[in-house]
Amino acid sequence: MPSDDRLLAQDIEAYLDRHQHKTLLRFITCGSVDDGKSTLIGRLLYDSQLILDDQVSGLRKDAKAGTEEENLDLALLVDGLAAEREQGITIDVAYRFFHTERRKFIVADTPGHEQYTRNMVTGASTADLAVVLVDARKGVLTQTRRHSYLVRLVGVRRVVLAVNKMDLIGWSRDEFDRIVAEYRAFAARLGIKEVQAIPMSALKGDNITRQSDHTPWYDGPTLMQHLETVEVANEAASGPLRMPVQWVNRPNLDFRGYSGLIAQGTVRPGDAVRVTPSGRTSTVTRIVTFDGDLDEARAGQSVTLTLADEIDISRGDVLCAADAPAEAAAQFEADIVWMADEALLPGRSYLVKMGAATVPAQVTEIKHRIDVNTLDEMAAKVLELNEIGRCNLAFSRPVPFAPYAETPDLGAFIIIDRISNATVGAGVIHFALRRSQNVHWQALAVDASARAGLKQQKPACLWFTGLSGAGKSTIANLVEKRLHSLGRHTYLLDGDNVRHGLNKDLGFTEADRVENVRRVAEVARLMSDAGLIVLVSFISPFRAERRMARTLFDEGRFFEVFVDTPLEVAEARDVKGLYKKARAGRLANFTGIDSPYEAPEQPEMHIHADQVSAERAAAAIVERLAEAGLFRA
Amino acid sequence: MTIDRPIAPETRRGLTHLQRLEAESIHIMREVAAQFERPVMLYSIGKDSAVMLHLAAKAFYPSRPPFPLLHVDTTWKFQDMYEMRERMARRYGMDLLVHINPEAQAHGINPFDHGSAVHTDIWKTQGLKQALDKYGFDAAFGGARRDEEKSRAKERIFSFRSAGHRWDPKNQRPELWRLYNGRIGPGESVRVFPLSNWTELDIWQYIYLHDVPIVPLYLAAERPVVDRSGTLIMVDDERMRLHPGEQPVMRSVRFRTLGCYPLSGAIESRAATLPEVIQEMLLARTSERQGRLIDHDQAASMEKKKQEGYF
């Protein structure tokens, strides 16, 4: 077989044909800071002769000194961001591309610092293999274990343990063996079965693309040999058809197609398909593409399918083989890695994106978090930045899924903050919890409107929020008195009172406050279902929870009442003496002092309680309720 | 505790590397169409734009792509590029929006008097922001590739921009698997790079295999050029300012990248067909953006431009 170089010079068509049919390996490099990841990649590119002349001259310019070629700082090739070059570290995942005569490679160079774990996970999620670097002088470190854990978590099964900087320990075989033994023991506990350990010096180029003279005792492959030959799992796309519908294609009334990337299996015209979650069935009529209809399409292809029947299918649904459809469920056990400064709070409402579906969801329970050093399971009430936990997760509606181990595209999800819209977490589903499916809603003969009709009112929830001492309870009490005198059926849930009973097991941490509000919101909903106008008087400092409460009620039946009193005024009143205590440090997590209050952005009613009397405020609120048609005043 | 991911779909047997890249790009474009209210495709008329446009046609077929094309024009492009622009909009049946920064026009900003940095900033960076704000686009496709330049290697596929179109490289959203988070607040937007994982070779190979139309300037031909400290500048129209004593000469040249003609360096070449261009590119030892003068102004200049809102 002629070499690439010869083909390139002599037969470009043959070269292109060969190049086009090369296999692809995506891998990630990870490890601790200063282990030499960027240098290693620079070395791979340099030794594959992919560093072009002007890039080398760029390196010289970067180094600002007339450096010798062998001392070129290869890491500068890949540390692209100015911020990184100033700090000499890699803060975000950088993707590099190179090819050899055997393969094409996409390598994700990922950051070492723990604070950039989210970037590392970003790179790992699309990798087939991980190169885990350790500094031979330091051995296996916390970051080595963390990264190994994370790559395993997102499903990478093959690891190269690159024991780097061997030149600095005199190419000691004993030291190498000791590091490898320690790592293998850890990897085995993670379930990583394939570990190829290679002694190397990225800086000097030993055992990267050429066999080192310093390691006569090592008879394994060089890094490049291993990357070129490691088996890329490529068995045909086995398994029944799964195609998440991304987009419904409707150019005109005569055409309705369903566009998506096939996640698993193959499809042909004539195949019977079933839609999850609706369960409806039909038959594939065409596989439509720009280049003409196809006779068959398989996993990895983006296609548009048309069906024989007009059935209701929308984005997020999954087209499945009719005889082996995907399941849908709303409650799962999952592993979550948390990637935001603000901790994950059980009970808080987030958005989850899985496949093409985006749904409100909450973590109902953190079963434990993992100490990545020891793999111990630790009790946890919240997940902080970079922590990993096993959680129960509840979606607001059933969604098509598969365990991640079976179909990655249907079992991986990201978690999105509803206010900032940032991606704050990611996770993989292990299995669905069956209990949700066994608790069905009881259809009741006497329903909410029947009960409310008897009371001649429309039930609603008035949610009073504001600082401690703002005057919430005072105003809520007056509102209830007025409603009562108008013959309306009401109930007032007061923060302090509820904490004496229903919620007496809860404290004042963020997690407990979220649960506190969740329970009260649910109680308020039950009471409104009973036909009552419910008044809730709770500090409820977080927007997310108030928004969650709002989602429990029908449109127009939830009134957020912001009792707005400046902190100085509330603190000056200090009816219960709490501000004094908090200022003295004897009361932790006190709203306004050492715990934030997130003011409502668009409350239905905004009471400037330092400017109007409680009586006038109450009268205005009742008037507003009558205007909203809850009852006849 | 741990689980096996069976097989990454893109490594399954049967699909070529290019087919996999194509499927990924189409998936990205459909996500944008589904997640955003007002997407737009930034069209620069270059070879990457040509591939991106072709992929858009494929992604939504038989529908037309559900977004317009936007060309942020500097008025200094090659004449061949303007012809190509009109031809492509017709071919793919798409609406073409052309934005010309009125301030740049009023001040007669040009590469000769104002230099490449000011010229590029005002026509392109400011022009792009004006256009995005004018039409209220919430997502803009760009043809950038990660293999082009160091700071681009770190760009997400969905690249979040704050209300002032700024890119915060230290605070990019995590982007896992194929799960693109397109949720944004008022005034915020996303730049989307469906060609992120393509290399220059992939682009050329795709153009060749699929007969994607490109501007003829990419292929070698006799053209009038002047040699300016080793950079060959084509004299494309009468606005070109010649130095005293300078005479355009006909040389066989082609362009590796296309921008404003006074800022695009040509290379001497006899490669008049695509395979010849690819062959020459692979044999050459000079990287792609070198022909664009704008990058040489300062180290890490591309990152700076991106923070300011340029692609």
Image (cartoon, coloured by chain):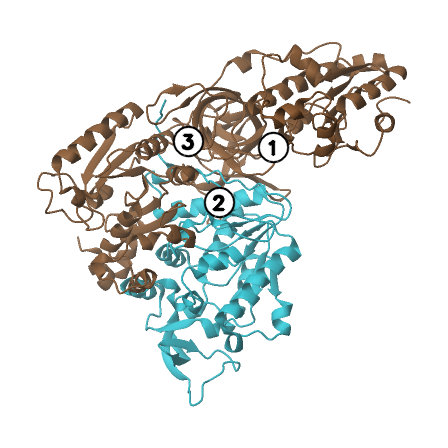
Chain colours: A brown, B cyan
The residue type indicated by label 1 comes to Glu
Question: Would you name the residue on which mark 2 appears?
Answer: B172
Q: Chain of mark 2?
A: B
Q: Are tags 2 and 1 found on a single chain?
A: no
SS type, badge 3: helix
- Name the quadrant of the C terminus of chain A: top right
Q: Are tags 2 and 3 found on a single chain?
A: no
The residue type indicated by label 2 comes to Gln
Question: Would you name the residue on which mark 1 appears?
Answer: A310
Give the distance between the C-alpha atoms of the residues marked 2 and 3, in whole angstroms.
24 Å
Q: Residues within 10 Å of mark 2 (few under 14, many from 20)?
A: many
Please give the name of the residue rendered at 72% of the width and 17% of the height, measured from the top-left corner. A494
Query: In this view of the protein, which residue sits in the foreground, B246 or A373?
Result: A373
Please give the name of the residue rendered at 37% of the width and 57% of the height, measured from the top-left corner. B200
Q: Is residue A446 left or right of residue A32?
A: right
- The picture places residue B202, in percent across and down from the top left corner, at 37, 54
SS type, badge 1: loop
Question: Would you name the residue on which mark 3 appears?
Answer: A408
